[in-house]
Amino acid sequence: MSAEIIPFPAPQVAVPAPAIREPAQPTPEVASQADDDRLRRALASLDAAVAGQRAAVAEWRQSLAQLGSTMNGLGASLGRYRDSLTRLEGQVGTLNGQAVALEEWADKALAEQG
């Protein structure tokens, strides 16, 4: 009988991790220019936002003016309607008086015949 010898795996040698380098610090000129660019972009965004707000406020004011003129027209229309109802009330009152007088006359006429 012969035995088979299985060799142990060879130990692996650890590979050192590459050294982490800190990012290079920009020169003061580059840093100042980057800050200026960032500030310009921020101001441009702010200007665009303010312009959008101005447009929204102008549209809102226009809508309020339109609503005001619509409400004025509605008020005038309601005034005319009220005047019409007042005239109608007078006419109905007159007709009611005539109907009551006619009814009284009819009642007298029936009483005299009866």
Image (cartoon, rainbow, N blue to C red):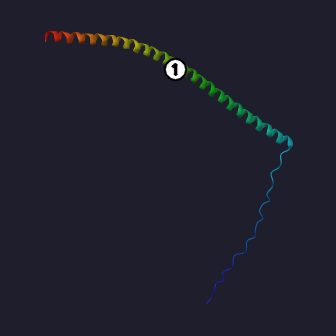
Q: Residues within 10 Å of mark 1 (few under 14, many from 20)?
A: few
Residue 24, x across and y down, in percent? 82, 50
Q: Position of residue 25 (x, y in %)?
A: 83, 48
Residue 52 lies, with reference to residue 1, above or below; the image says: above
Residue denoted by label 1 = 71
Q: Nearer the viewer, residue 23 or 83?
A: 83
User: Residue at left 60%, top 24%?
Assistant: 61
Residue lying at 68% horizontally and 32% vertically, measured from the top left: 49
Quarter of the N terminus within the rendering: bottom right
**Residue at the location (55% across, 20% down)?**
68
Q: Position of residue 39 (x, y in %)?
A: 77, 37
Task: Report the residue that reaches farthest toward the bottom.
Answer: 1
Inspect the image, locate mark 1, and give the three-letter code of the amino acid beneath it: Met
With 51 as the anchor, is 62 left or right in this view?
Answer: left
Vertical order, 71 against 33 (above or below): above
Determine the secondary structure under disc 1.
Answer: helix
In this view, 32 is above or below 95: below
Judged left or right of residue 8, residue 97 is left
Q: Nearer the viewer, residue 10 or 61?
A: 61
Tell whether 33 sits left or right of 92. right
Residue 100, image quadrant: top left
Name which residue lies at 31% across and 11% down. 97
Q: Nearer the viewer, residue 102 or 53?
A: 102
Residue 93: quarter of image: top left
